Amino acid sequence: MTGFLASVASLDEMEAARLGGADIVDLKEPARGALGAWSHDDLRRAVAAWTAWRGPRPLLSATIGDQPMTPGIVREAAEAVASTGVPIVKLGVFADGDPLACFAALEPLAARRRLIAVFFGDLAPDLALLEHVAAAGFHGAMLDTADKAAGGLRRHLGQPELSAFVNRARTLGLLTGLAGSLTIEDIAPLASLGPDYLGFRGALCVGGRTGRVDPAAIRNVRATLEESRRAA
Ligand SMILES: O=C[C@H](O)COP(=O)(O)O
């Protein structure tokens, strides 16, 4: 069953994502980049709001910002986000720098917090790195896109490549996610690959991904995902 990750930019949007049935509420500031980060104070407020939710509640994740692949920088940013109490921390695997040294530097944090490595479909992702992500103790891996003006994930990678990513990550015991300017039309073909979740921001918004979340669009994505589950 493929879940629904909704990226949100405010506490109000966080609540809208919960009410709309998101399985993962992902704290992200889209105006600051593909993995734009919330301020640490706002992350603390979000964790407090999430903790106060009663009944079944979605998981909570947050991004660390678009950081260079430099071990000290990535580790410091990830530790700082984790210190706010966010249970799942997402960080990008960009094309520059030293990804292996970054994964190794994050091993201690991965032992006490769920980390997700975000690869980018438009930056020639290296699937061989998945093995190192798993070896460092990461919880999951996902594919997204870095350049939001350059088309959605399926423009950059075909079904065979996407399927290879999902299968390889799953074989390594990683939670798997797919995102990147996804639209309603992408849901059925991507859900058929069996990722653990699909991630959305732009499709949930009025006025593009830096606009505001529209509750009707959230419900539409949720309903379409459920339809694709029934059809599977
Ligand atoms: O993690 C998921 C992303 O926030 C997706 O954002 P996007 O749909 O605007 O590419």
Image (cartoon, rainbow, N blue to C red):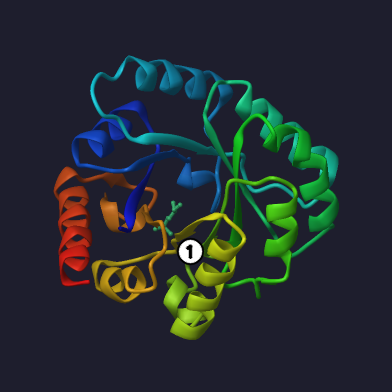
Q: Nearer the viewer, residue 159 or 134?
A: 134
Any atom of ligand 1 within 8 Å of the CB at mark 1? Answer: yes
Residue 47: % across, % down:
44, 21
Residue 72: % across, % down:
84, 38
Residue 136: % across, % down:
74, 48
- Residue type for callout 1: Lys
Q: Is residue 194 left or right of residue 170?
A: left
Q: Is residue 77 left or right of residue 118?
A: right
Which residue is labeled 1 in the image? 148
Q: In the rendered view, would you say 156 is above or below 13?
A: below
Q: Secondary structure at mark 1?
A: loop
Rendering quarter of residue 227: bottom left
In what quadrant does ligand 1 lie? Answer: bottom left
Residue depicted at x 57% and y 21%: 84
Q: In the rendered view, would you say 21 is above or below 69?
A: above
Residue depicted at x 36% and y 55%: 200
